[in-house]
Amino acid sequence: MELILWRHAEAEIGEPDEGRALTGKGHKQAWKMADWLDHNLPNSCKIISSPATRTVQTAEALGRKFKTHPHLAPDCSAEQLLAVANWPFNREPVLIIGHQPTLGQVAALLIAGQMQEWSVRKGNVWWIAQRERGDITTNYLKAVMSSDLIAK
């Protein structure tokens, strides 16, 4: 399975938290990353977003069909995110657009094997995959991408 974690782009400060929209910079971050993802994601990739405004706007930049899921809201746990993604059983790649600290916790759990507070920066993507060799399955970091590295 492949799990792609995409943190929402830069958002306005304010309340209510779930209604915060992307800033102008955030829209640019989302479009740049969406362009990179569109060239690298398989067509069969399932895309699921938090219902928060800033994650929906980030997902919309990709221009592909996606669903929102209430268990991906800003206060979700790593376990909830993995359940929504159906990790490790899903045969198709899954892209989750979500929030900190959950994305960093999931990345740490899958890569380091224990819950830690890792930081996934706004607008960044962490692509985690599994490799099966005989009876052994290992997780590895396939890519980390920042919108700052994408020319446009």
Image: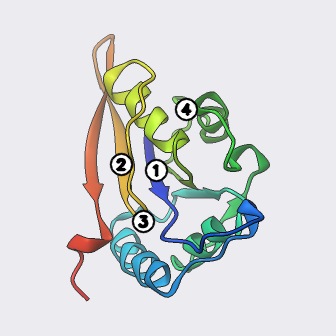
Q: Earlier in the sequence, mark 4 or mark 3?
A: 4
Q: CA distance from mark 3 to mark 1?
A: 10 Å
The kind of residue on which mark 4 rests is Trp
Nearer the observer, disc 1 or disc 4?
1
Residue furthest to the top: 135
Q: Earlier in the sequence, mark 3 or mark 1?
A: 1
Q: CA distance from mark 1 to mark 4?
A: 12 Å
Q: Earlier in the sequence, mark 1 or mark 4?
A: 1
- Residue at numbered disc 3: 123
Q: CA distance from mark 1 to mark 2?
A: 6 Å
The kind of residue on which mark 2 rests is Trp
Whether residues under marks 3 and 1 lie with C-beta atoms below 8 angstroms apart, the answer is no
> For residue 140, what is the image quadrant?
top left
How many residues crowd around disc 1 within 10 Å: few (fewer than 14), some, or many (20 or more)? Answer: many
- Residue at numbered disc 2: 127
> For residue 39, what is the image quadrant?
bottom left
- Residue at numbered disc 4: 87
Horizontal side of residue 139 vs 80, given as left or right: left
Q: Is residue 99 visible?
A: yes
The kind of residue on which mark 1 rests is Leu
- Residue at numbered disc 1: 5
Whether residues under marks 1 and 2 lie with C-beta atoms below 8 angstroms apart, the answer is yes
Residue displayed at 46% across by 50% down: 5
Give the x, y percent position of residue 120: 39, 49
